[in-house]
Amino acid sequence: MSDAAARAHLRALAHAPRPAGGAAEAVARAHAADTLRRLRFDVQEVPFTYSALVGRWGTPIAGLASITVLAAAASFGAAGRASAALTLMSAALVVGGMIGWWAARRGVLSAPVLRRRGVNLVATRGDARPTVWLVAHLDSKSQPVPIGVRAAGVTGTIVAWLAALVLAGAQLAGATWATPAVWWALAAFAAVAGVPVAASVVTARSPGALDDASGVATVLLAAEALRDLPEAPGVLLTSAEELGLAGARAWCAQRHAAGEVAGVALNVDGVDDVGALTAMTGARVPTALVAALEAAARDAGATLGVRRLVPGILVDAVALADAGWATLTLSRGTWGTLTRIHSPRDSADRLDGTGVAEAARVLAGAARALLGAARGGARGGEPGVRVPPAGRTA
């Protein structure tokens, strides 16, 4: 797992922007497939169809809707009609929540508009039904708003909604400070926070070295490091992650239809050369996976942090967790890293491969421990390393 090998993968994968379904993504997928075949994996290209509506326009629509609803609520509140403001916001939250839930989990695959075709790369060796999978995504995108600014906008929008609900309740309770000026100040804050969310339209100008050629390279190097095992982890390289996590959701739906159960997935997304390795989790922390990564990091002489995903940042692990998988995302970087993601500056010449090589060592070590635990082998007996029981069908 040399830095030179990491750089070679990065150059081959991030040679051009890779919009989902495009020629450059197909070239990257072919490179990954060739690499895995040399490692004696059985490789399949698994097609799926999806709607690009959610991934391409869902975030801008949500941003505009938030600005509009909170401006209307402020007009009601400033006019002394706090009950109308509260009713409007409550209705918007209920309806918007239902639409958002459906769009993210169902609509991305079933909405009848903007239909597209994607291809996931699925590779197995030894066990055709592995319980441990290594995951990354092949496609890339760009946006006019840096991902860090978008995340700040999402966080600010959440704060604005909470503040507006509190303000309406305070006004109904007779609070003297709930004045029209406060309402309009809150509306202005909501507009400022909502603009980067509304401006998050999808374009195709980023070579996607960090996001996510680095993740694919990490998975390929980890698979190579595990070539001595008779049974390797499965490898899933998705398409259309940048369009509503469509590839991961389609794969889970296909497995569910085939009666397959959920397992363990180590997702890799955004590996820079700077910063500390981080295991990013959802609301449910997969303690066995965290323990395996922490042990592997110690063995590799690396530092591993653990934290929740930043609001507004979506990764394939979100879709996998929704389908019942024990999963997390391995990443590395700083806040400065976020300024390059989804921009033309996210190119391979800005990475020297040291971060990918280190992440691959940690990923391989964790996968080896989890595979050993699944087999009941010697490594599976290590304290704190246990494969979670299989989840529901996925």
Image: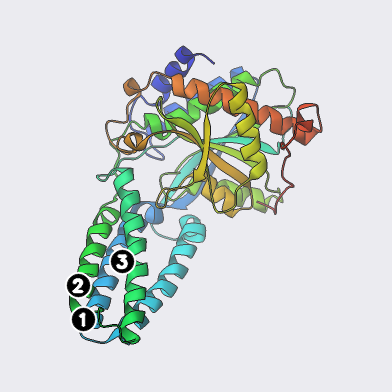
Q: Please indicate, yes or no, whether residue 185 appears anywhere in the rendered image.
A: yes
Find residue 351 and report its image quarter. top left
Q: What residue type is labelled 3?
A: Ser
Find residue 162 and report its image quarter. bottom left
112 or 386, nearer to the observer: 386
- Residue 308's spot in the image, x, y percent? 50, 47
Sequence order check, earlier mark of 1 and 3: 3
On residue 392, which mark appears? none
- Residue 301's spot in the image, x, y percent? 56, 21
Q: Which residue is drawn at 42% across and 37% down?
A: 139
Q: Nearer the viewer, mark 3 or mark 2?
A: 2
Check disc 3 and report the residue beneath it: 66
Q: Please indicate, yes or no, whether residue 33 appears anywhere in the rendered image.
A: no
Sequence order check, earlier mark of 2 and 1: 1
116 or 333, nearer to the observer: 333
357 relative to 340 in the view: left or right: right
Disc 2 vs disc 1: Cβ atoms closer than 8 Å?
yes
159 or 84, nearer to the observer: 159
On residue 78, which mark appears? 1
Q: Which amino acid does label 1 sit on?
A: Ala
* Real-space CA distance between mark 1 and mark 3, rounded to the nearest whole angstrom: 18 Å
Q: What residue type is labelled 2?
A: Trp
Residue at the far left in the pictured view:
181
Callout 1: 10 Å neighbours few (<14), some, many (20+)? some
279 or 258, nearer to the observer: 279
130 relative to 24 in the view: left or right: right
Sequence order check, earlier mark of 3 and 2: 3
